[in-house]
Image: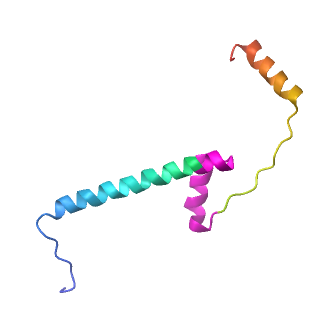
Amino acid sequence: MDDMLTLPDHSGALLVAIKELINGIENLDVSIDYLSAAVSGHSPLEIGTDQSLLGRFASPSQRIEENITKKEILNYIMQLRESGRL
């Protein structure tokens, strides 16, 4: 076939550079998932899964905010202290 692309002799270096670029983009995507998780309250796994399943159509779901009283927080802290985890 005459339509085939002929790569130069130094194409090995080009392929290595492309693979490094792809790895960098994948790492950036994971970093963005962690940043999104910090802002949205979702886990990075949830965000990555949504993107894998829905692609660019993925949108963050709304989380229900829990009203936690000061007394509940203090009780939780006491439980952690009593169990030795704090």
Q: Name the residue at 83% across, 42% down.
A: 66
Q: Is residue 57 above or below residue 82?
A: below
- Which residues, given as a range, are shown in magenta? 36-58
Q: Main secondary structure of the magenta part?
A: helix
Image x and y of residue 32, in percent: 53, 52
**Which quadrant would the C terminus be assigned to in this image?**
top right
- Displayed quadrant of residue 79: top right
Q: Name the residue at 37% across, 53% down.
A: 23
Image x and y of residue 46, in percent: 62, 50
Image x and y of residue 25, in percent: 41, 56
Q: Name the residue at 49% across, 50% down.
A: 30
- Between 53 and 57, the one lying in front of the other is 57
Q: Is residue 48 above or below residue 14?
A: above
Q: Is residue 43 above or below residue 84?
A: below
**Which quadrant would the N terminus be assigned to in this image?**
bottom left
Is 22 displayed left or right of 58 in the figure? left
